[in-house]
């Protein structure tokens, strides 16, 4: 095989990856897009196998074995994982990409000749830089994603863990990593240098994520998505491989855009999310005053009666729906309402749930047609014409304080205008304030009825009452 | 006779001097040859250095070409991702995750490398093997879970 054919095949793989992302512009084209992605990946792997320098049967058997070891659990997990566990699954997958990048950088460092980047101990300056960056970003992605996984999976408290002087520690570690990269480039290419570089990067990834709280996870998970792309690009530059560089750039910019969208959805700057600590002691201190005002409490029967007699109901799902796994019961309720001639729509806030698009996937899992589900900008004006806003497991994203109260920590955040609906029904377990630690003024309004209880049980009871 | 003897002596002295001169010349020639050889060696080293310099100069041009691809791909990614509907942001994350596992290419190179190449070749191969397995979890898991999710997005049945 000549030099050009593999390069052309890598370009073909890159184009297929671009089409995979392009397909996601609408649900109809998305399935074809995903298939393009699979074909692209198959091409990239097959091309590499045919240009291996030692492509004996032995190497191929070894590769097939390694792929099988990964493929079996991968396929099993993909089939079995519940949709509510998607955020932690994605975090776990990010950690694998990060770790793979670290291992590949090490493999290239130990056997530079095989990778065409120089001799052991005398790796080309530029390759040393690329490989160091690949290892460092990969390591940060790995340890950061592991922490994100533990937090999302509930193995670790979602509360931010705040170390004293953490900014100074992080800054020091960052400088240390730069020094190690410098040493790698100026000829001090001992494996201990590379090891310390890797270890420092693991530690900083860990420290960067532990102070970030649960509701900021949509930003964190998008950011780690972005990092995994940059790590792949770093490896791509080391190998001078086009498919890797293009993919790294695509994934890197995708994650960056998602982080930006999530930050905008919370009206928080990216820097303040990364610095962490939101929703911790400083935020909850503001909500210290005990609430004594009366709220109107209702039963499932009351809710069923109100919604049955409504013309239009807008459902606002939040993280609470995911926790209670209430999406199927909710869909059943909506179907019954539709039989009563009620128009049902769903309104999704950009940061509802724990990852971008989390609510949409859960509703899709419950067979809610996607043309009944609307984004904030598209439906916000419609609350005025709705008789009922059914808020299930959401709180902060409906809080009008974000529009009026300049002192509120969520001031400026885009919110769903549920208060414009005739009646607002809140399904909540208790009166506890939301993640931001802010009391929701809406609970005390005359047209609000609180439905205390587990989101799933409440929906099932409403279904019975209907 | 006296004159003849003197002449002979003179001739002998001259011959001696000539021999000495020849000897010096020979010595000089050796030195010169050595110098020439040294100069040639220097020239060769210099040429090698020039070649190395030229190689290192052509290095950046390759790098710049890859960098250009990288930057253009970031722009492509920017526009493509903004066109993704927010409803599909979760599948976007899982599919980007799957395609970033194309780093498996690097791991395959490590597994398929010549073992005789370097002292740490065995370790390199082992790391590559583990990396292939990790990336495969992602490739299969990522694409299949995306497929499963996308299969759930249905339009109103009417």
Image (cartoon, rainbow, N blue to C red):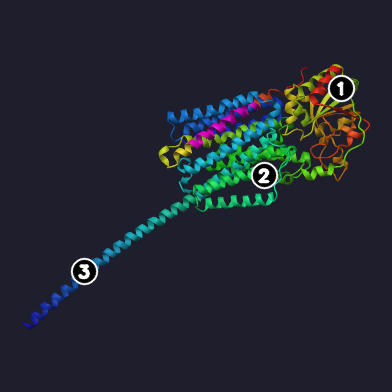
**A155 or A37: which is nearer to us?**
A155
Q: Is residue A289 above or below residue A325?
A: below
Residue drawn at x 79%, y 24% is A456
Q: How many marks are shown on the rendered structure?
A: 3
Q: Is residue B133 above or below residue A120?
A: above
Residue A462: tell me if it is visible. yes
Q: Earlier in the sequence, mark 1 or mark 2?
A: 2
The residue identified by callout 2 is A208
Residue drawn at x 86%, y 46% is A407
The residue identified by callout 1 is A300
Badge 1: chain ID: A
Residue drawn at x 82%, y 44% is A285
Q: Which mark is residue B22?
A: 3
Q: What is the spatial separation of the Cα atoms under label 1 and label 2, in whole angstroms?
A: 44 Å
Quarter of the image with the C terminus of chain A is top right
Q: Secondary structure at mark 1?
A: helix
Please check the rendered image and state whether residue B96 is part of the magenta-colored stretch, yes or no.
no
């Amino acid at each position: 095989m000549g030099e050009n054919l593999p390069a052309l095949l890598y370009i073909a793989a890159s184009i297929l990856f671009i089409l995979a992302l392009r397909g996601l512009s609408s649900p109809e084209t998305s399935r074809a897009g995903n298939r393009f992605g699979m074909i692209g990946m198959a091409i990239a792997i097959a091309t590499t196998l045919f240009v291996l320098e030692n492509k004996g049967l032995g190497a191929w058997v070894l590769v097939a074995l390694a792929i099988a070891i990964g493929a079996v659990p991968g396929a099993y997990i993909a089939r079995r994982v519940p949709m509510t566990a998607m955020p932690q699954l994605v975090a776990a997958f990010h950690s694998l990409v990060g770790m793979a990048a670290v291992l590949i950088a090490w493999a290239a460092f130990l056997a530079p000749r095989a990778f065409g980047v120089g001799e052991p101990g005398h790796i080309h300056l530029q390759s040393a830089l690329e490989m160091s960056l690949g290892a460092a970003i990969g390591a940060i992605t790995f340890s950061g994603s592991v922490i994100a996984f533990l937090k999302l999976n509930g193995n670790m408290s979602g509360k931010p863990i705040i170390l004293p002087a953490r900014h100074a520690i992080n800054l020091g570690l960052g400088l240390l990593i730069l020094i190690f990269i410098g040493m790698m480039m100026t000829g001090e290419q001992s494996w201990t240098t590379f090891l310390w570089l890797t270890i420092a990067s693991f530690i900083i990834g860990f420290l960067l994520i532990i102070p970030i709280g649960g509701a900021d996870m949509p930003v964190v998970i998008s950011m780690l998505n972005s990092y995994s792309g940059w790590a792949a690009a770093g490896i791509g530059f080391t190998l001078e491989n086009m498919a890797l560089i293009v993919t790294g750039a695509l994934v890197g910019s995708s994650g960056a855009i998602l982080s930006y969208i999530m930050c905008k959805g919370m009206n928080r700057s990216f820097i303040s999310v990364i610095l962490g600590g939101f929703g911790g002691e400083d935020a909850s201190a503001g909500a210290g005053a005990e609430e004594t005002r009366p709220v109107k409490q209702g039963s499932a029967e009351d809710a069923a009666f109100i919604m049955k007699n409504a013309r239009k109901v807008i459902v606002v799902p939040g993280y609470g729906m995911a926790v209670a796994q209430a999406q199927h019961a909710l869909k059943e309720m909506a179907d019954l309402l539709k039989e009563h001639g009620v128009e049902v729509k769903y309104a999704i806030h950009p940061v509802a749930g724990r990852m971008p698009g989390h609510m949409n996937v859960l509703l899709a899992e419950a067979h809610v047609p996607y043309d009944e589900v609307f984004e904030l900008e598209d439906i916000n004006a419609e609350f005025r014409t709705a008789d009922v806003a059914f808020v299930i497991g959401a709180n902060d994203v409906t809080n009008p304080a974000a529009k009026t109260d300049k002192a509120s920590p969520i001031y400026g955040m885009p919110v769903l205008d549920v208060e414009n609906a005739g009646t607002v029904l809140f399904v909540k377990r208790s009166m506890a304030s939301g993640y931001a630690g802010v009391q929701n003024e809406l609970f005390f309004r005359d047209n609000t009825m609180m439905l205390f209880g587990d989101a799933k049980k409440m929906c099932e009871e409403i279904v019975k009452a209907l | 006779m006296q004159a003849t003897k003197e002449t002979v002596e003179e001739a002998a002295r001259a011959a001696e001097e000539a021999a000495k001169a020849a000897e010096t010349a020979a010595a000089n020639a050796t030195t010169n040859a050595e110098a020439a050889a040294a100069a040639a060696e220097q020239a060769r080293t210099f040429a090698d250095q020039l070649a190395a310099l030229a190689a290192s100069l052509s290095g950046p041009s390759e790098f710049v070409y890859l960098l250009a691809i990288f930057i253009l791909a970031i722009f492509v990614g920017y526009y493509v991702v903004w066109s993704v509907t927010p409803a599909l942001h979760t599948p976007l994350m899982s599919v980007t995750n799957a395609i970033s596992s194309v780093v498996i290419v690097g791991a395959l190179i490590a597994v398929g490398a010549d073992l005789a190449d370097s002292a740490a070749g065995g370790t390199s191969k082992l790391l590559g093997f583990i990396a292939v397995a990790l990336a495969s979890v992602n490739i299969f898991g990522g694409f299949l879970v995306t497929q499963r999710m996308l299969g759930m997005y249905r339009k109103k049945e009417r």
